[in-house]
Image (cartoon, rainbow, N blue to C red):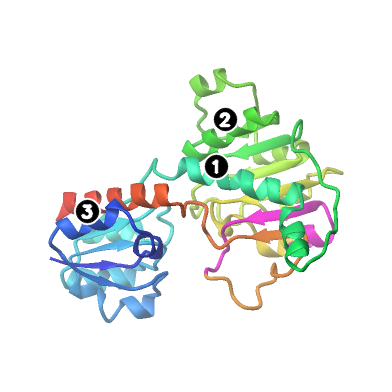
Amino acid sequence: MKILLTTTSFQDTPGKHHDALKKTGFEVDTLHGPVTEEELLPIIANYDGVICGDDFYTKKVLETGNKGKLKVLSKYGIGLDKIDLTAAEELGIKVTNCPGVNHITVAEHVFALMLTYYKNIHLEYNYTQNGKWKRLIGHEIYNKKIGVIGLGRIGKEVVKRANAFGLEIFVYDIHLDHEFLRNYKINILSNINEAFQKCDIVTLHMNLTEDNRNIISDSIFDDMGNNKVIIVNTARGDLIEMDALLKGLDNKYISAYLTDVLEEEPMPLHHPLKSRKNVIITPHIGSRTYESVERQGTMAVENLLKYL
């Protein structure tokens, strides 16, 4: 069996997941992703399976793989939006992912971004690194109103931490877990627009689909009235329409955009969000902790083994 490993987190982080892959006895080739369609087309037919990150498994790539040895794509992580799932099903290529392995670390990253912004930590760090002692005035997050869009595993962990920090919690999801809701003091929203009308912070925790691509757009911002929000995005960059976001930042009804994800990754050199003072960007590291990588990597190997 021959395997292609493209996820950088798996490769760059030591842990038991490497031992699990080695024990399979498979021949393993590595590339540092995200790997493009053009890079995959000449090689994909050579592999029985792939442990992939956010590589571009288009219909063309999958058809090429199907003509060769390809049997399974084991996604390291959760999001499957870069894989043509319809084509995979038609071709009989199994696609797996790793639900339930990164919800804690991503939820922690949400609060890392929020506290960094509210307490000016990113700015103060740079001042002291340059030998300056400039003391800015920050804000508390206590008693702020937070809107959690998507109450899956990560959204629930965000709610737990928001409760501990004393935030007033608002939640929107198509399918609500009422047992979970009973354990926390939560205000239920009837639609996404309400979060932007009522909350100081809106944090996104939705899987990307064709139905919700660019769902955060002018139509939502136009309904905000005089409210101003901070948007936190650790889900997918394509949930937000870029032109609408830029207009909102320029006109200050979006106070700040704190994101771990972009619509194009790695970030292009001249990305329009780069260098804006009210934007904090981290390079898709929300789940990149030793603990999470080991959990995800081990599950990705186990998923691969199930179908080979």
Which quarter shows the C terminus? Answer: bottom left
Residue bearing mark 1? 107
**Does residue 78 appear in this view?**
no
- In this rendering, would 169 be left or right of 308? right
Which residue appears at 49% of the width and 26% of the height? 177
Residue drawn at (56%, 43%) of the image? 108
Q: Residue at x 69, y 67 (%)?
A: 273
Residue 207 in the image, given as x and y percentages of width and height: 49, 48
Residue 43 vertical placement versus 110 (above, below) = below
Which residue corresponds to mark 3?
20
Please tell me whether residue 200 is drawn above or below residue 66 in the rendered image. Answer: above
Give the residue type that dot 2 points to.
Answer: Lys
Residue at 76% x, 30% y: name it: 143
Residue 75, picture quadrant: bottom left
Q: Find numbered disc 3 in the image and state the secondary structure of the residue it sits on.
A: helix
* Residue stretch rendered in magenta on the structure: 246-265
Q: Residues within 10 Å of mark 1 (few under 14, many from 20)?
A: many
Q: Is residue 23 left or right of residue 204?
A: left
Residue 8, x across and y down, in percent: 39, 65
Residue 306 in sight here: yes
Q: Amino acid at mark 1?
A: Ala
Question: Which residue corresponds to mark 2?
Answer: 160
Q: Is residue 242 positioned above or below 290 on the image?
A: below
Do the residues under discs 1 and 2 have CB atoms within 8 angstroms?
yes
Mark earlier in primary sequence (1, 3)? 3
Q: Secondary structure at mark 2?
A: helix
Residue 262: say if magenta.
yes
N-term mark: 1 or 2:
1
